[in-house]
Image (tube, grey):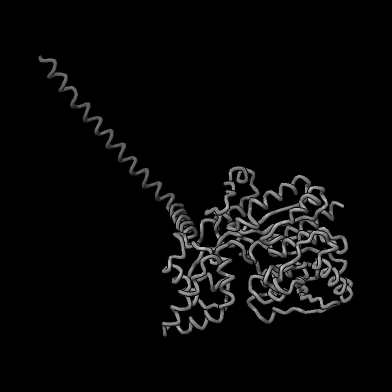
Amino acid sequence: MNPRISLDSNKEPLLSDRMNTYQRNFHFLKLYFRSCIRRHLNSLIIACLLSSLCFLILFYFKNQTVFNLFTYLFSWIPFYRKFSPKTDTSPFNVRKRSGLSIYDQQIIYNDYDYLHNSTLTFEKRIYSTNIEILFRLPKKVSPSALLLIFHGCSRSANDWFSTIERQRIIGAALDLGYGCLAFQSTDAFSHCWSNEFDLSNNPDVQMVWNGLDGFYKEYPKLKLLPRFTFGASSGGMFSSIFAINSRHKIQGQIIFISIVHPELLESHVRKGTYPPTAWIYMTRDTEFASQSRINESMKHFAEQNIPHKSYAIEPIQVTSTIFHERIPTLTRETSQYIFECLQQNNWLDSENYLKHNPRRRNTWPDFLLLTVNKTHTNSNIFENLNAHKKILPDFFNTIYGEHEISFERSFEALQWHQQIYKMKNNST
């Protein structure tokens, strides 16, 4: 017998057996998966629904908003804090450009609501030597502190009760229990505040002192409340000077898009004789109140264990509704029109942030107002735009995010000061 033929004939049954084994195993696997699907069908349906829900959340909300939500929910877990991504400290971080913080999104104005004109009331007093103070005290809660407010150059005390961004700062402060007092600088030409750090030679310090003396004569009980300051731009620099006064001592200050007077860093901060300070700055402000400059100042505060904190305001992403959302008297139709004009005239980048600084390239009024003026069908938009001619330039600056007023982060800074003051009192 030929052995080769014998070997081949012996292989055939072996191959057949293997094929039968594979077929049986495959059949068992199919039965197993079918039974698993039947047993876990409800779980699969729930998993699919949850996946769809997560997709919708990511699709309809910005990624940073979702990140903020998870940070808020899980920040108490040590593992999460350890491995959560660190914040980039670059001047303009794309990942952080997310619009309003969680705190700002949740603000409800119970007392002084910019959306309801009937609540936007305030009082005016003129004390000795023609010192004017505009003020509003909390009505829904008892006053727990006073907030002395110093405007920026070319502005006035009245702006704090008549422009939306400032009204929202006032509204947040009132809900937290701050009585708000807005002062007018003595410089009638520039409306800037004096930078003289010798208090005896600073006319604005003298004016605020005398104004407070008159106010306390009328409201003697309020003199017992702690005082804080909020200064914007030039008013922020002045706040840093007023902070060293002992006649009407303050417990803390918020410096908005401004800095601490350099002389005071040496004479008071380094000696540890300076109040808690919070800075609110804009990330595109790389000159006067830059992040790097504020960080350098905070090093001196840290060396002396003086409470300090900074809050960044990012540029605002332009959407078809953003102008209506921030300026409600601008209609949705007008907001949509502004958005489309900015797109058509190459003013927006790929992520719909302003590419050009409105202060340095002031061409947007031309294509917004002149174009719509020629279009009869847009007459309503034209009238709405014209009614906001004086408001729009400031908001364009706010959107760009370099050096302009914004209500953002103020609530957090005001609340932080309350916590620091409470901790200080509890420790004593």
Is residue 110 visible in the rendered image? The answer is no
Q: Quadrant of residue 241?
A: bottom right
Q: Residue at x 70, y 53 (%)?
A: 309
Asked where in the image residue 108 lies, by quadrant, the reply is bottom right
User: Left or right: 199 with respect to 337?
Assistant: right
Q: Is residue 405 left or right of residue 415?
A: left
Q: Position of residue 218 (x, y in %)?
A: 87, 76
Using the image, determine if residue 38 lies above or below residue 337: above
Q: Residue at x 70, y 57 (%)?
A: 259
Give the quadrant of residue 236: bottom right
From the top left corner, tell me how far across and down residue 8 is, in percent.
Answer: 15, 22
Residue at image coords 46%, 84%: 379
Q: Is residue 78 above or below residue 422?
A: above
* Residue in the foreground of this view, choosing between 134 and 19: 134
Residue 35 visible here: yes
**Residue at 81% from the left image edge and 68% from the top image edge:** 203
Total numbered circles: 0
Q: Position of residue 50 (x, y in %)?
A: 48, 56
